[in-house]
Image (spheres, grey):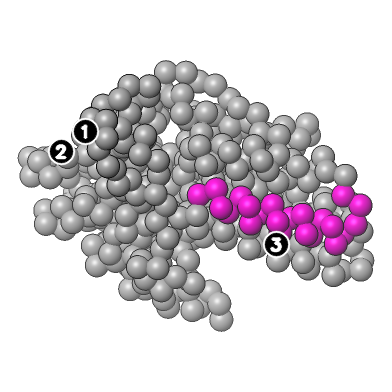
């Protein structure tokens, strides 16, 4: 059974998130009482992963909207817009929160103009829409997993063993459930086609060592943890079938922002002729961003590099550069795996054009 990073009970209006800063040592859920709590758990990376960020951010608003003493539809609309824009600022690189905010702000604007909808109806419809996002994310992730597994198997001759490399954490802990890149791995495993998965430690925050390894052990998937610097040696010495990673944002041309260290894995994969895939919900594709050069890259505090927990591992006084993400050029990506299918990067512009026509 997959781990649950988000627990939400609409009947009691209760939202809790699994504190990922404490994993794998301690399993503890943190109560999120409203938008301020939502912003903090996202910014502090107690919850992380682009899909999970969007879900938790929106659910924190749903919790607050049901408790707020709002008196008019106009006030409701203003509150929604202000709070959603605030939530987007918590971690700006991930596009899913921004896309969800735009959709919900548009919905609030439309409902406020509709004279047939009263304030309570507006509140109910708005909260119901957010609850549907949670359910849709899980269904989309399972579709991503199945689509990705079929794509990888189509490139593997006969019954050859499938060995996959993944980077960072893209599983149940990064989504509403099941996962994106790790969802692909789960699907291969459930089909009994996966021989082994290699997960990187993902410095400096160690999401691979702390979180992905935790999920793989939980689900009894055959796996090995490697340091980020070992990927080249691994590809040279082992027959790797594919690399599958997640994405925080995909530009219209297929350039992809993901956890720092992804770009170098893609370069190495191309050299070793290993197909490199990006698995993400379709909402991660940002039609407004033409290329990866325009993606804003979040920079994190020095302490994430200089310390592991409370222990300093770097010399005092050293300067640090700590971008949370890097951008992998579309030319290095074999396919972008979504719930709607697998697309080559050069296909995205046509797909997005059809979407908007």
The residue range painted magenta reads 70-91
Whether residue 83 is in magenta: the answer is yes
Q: How far apart in space, not on screen, are marks 2 and 1 (Cα)?
A: 6 Å
- Of the 4 image quadrants, the one containing the C terminus is bottom right
Q: Secondary structure at mark 1?
A: strand
Question: Is 217 or 24 nearer to us in this picture?
Answer: 24
- Residue 245 percent location from the top left of the image: 33, 49
- Residue 303 percent location from the top left of the image: 37, 34
Tell me the tag on residue 226.
Answer: 1
Q: Residue furthest front?
A: 317
Residue at 63%, 63% in the rendered image? 102
Mark 1 vs mark 3, foreground winner is 3
* Residue picked out by circle 3: 105
Q: Compare marks 1 and 3 and give the one earlier in the sequence.
A: 3
Q: Is residue 23 visible?
A: yes
Question: Magenta stretch: dominant SS?
Answer: helix
**Cβ atoms at labels 2 and 1 below 8 Å apart:** yes
**Left or right: 186 in relation to 229:** right
């Amino acid at each position: 059974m997959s781990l649950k990073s988000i627990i939400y009970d609409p009947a009691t209006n209760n939202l809790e998130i699994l504190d990922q800063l404490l994993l794998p040592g301690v399993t503890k859920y943190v109560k999120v009482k409203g938008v301020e709590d939502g912003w903090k758990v996202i910014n502090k990376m107690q919850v992380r992963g682009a899909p999970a960020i969007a879900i938790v951010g929106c659910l924190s608003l749903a919790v607050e909207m049901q408790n707020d003493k709002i008196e008019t539809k106009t006030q409701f609309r203003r509150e929604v817009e202000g709070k959603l824009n605030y939530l987007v600022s918590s971690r700006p690189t991930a596009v899913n929160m921004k896309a969800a905010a735009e959709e919900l702000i548009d919905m609030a604007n439309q409902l406020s103009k509709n004279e047939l909808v009263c304030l309570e109806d507006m509140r109910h419809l708005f909260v119901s829409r957010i609850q549907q996002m949670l359910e849709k994310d899980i269904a989309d992730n399972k579709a991503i997993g199945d689509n990705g597994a079929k794509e990888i198997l189509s490139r593997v001759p006969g019954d050859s063993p499938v060995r996959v490399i993944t980077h960072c954490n893209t599983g149940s802990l990064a989504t509403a459930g099941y996962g994106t890149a790790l969802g692909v791995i789960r699907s291969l495993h459930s089909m009994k086609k996966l021989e082994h998965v290699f997960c990187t430690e993902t410095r400096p925050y160690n999401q691979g060592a702390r979180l992905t390894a935790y999920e793989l052990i939980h689900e009894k998937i055959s796996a090995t943890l490697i340091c980020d610097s070992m990927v080249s040696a691994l590809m040279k010495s082992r027959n790797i079938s594919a690399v599958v990673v997640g994405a925080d944002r995909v530009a219209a041309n297929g350039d992809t922002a993901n956890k720092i260290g992804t770009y170098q894995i893609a370069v190495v994969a191309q050299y070793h002729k290993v197909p490199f895939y990006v698995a993400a919900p379709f909402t991660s594709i940002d039609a407004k961003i033409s290329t990866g050069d325009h993606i804003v890259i979040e920079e994190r505090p020095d302490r994430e590099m200089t310390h592991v927990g409370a222990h300093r591992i770097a010399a005092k006084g050293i300067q640090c550069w700590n971008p949370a993400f890097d951008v992998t050029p579309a030319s290095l990506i074999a396919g972008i795996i979504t719930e709607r299918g697998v697309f080559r990067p050069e296909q995205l512009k046509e797909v997005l054009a059809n979407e908007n026509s």
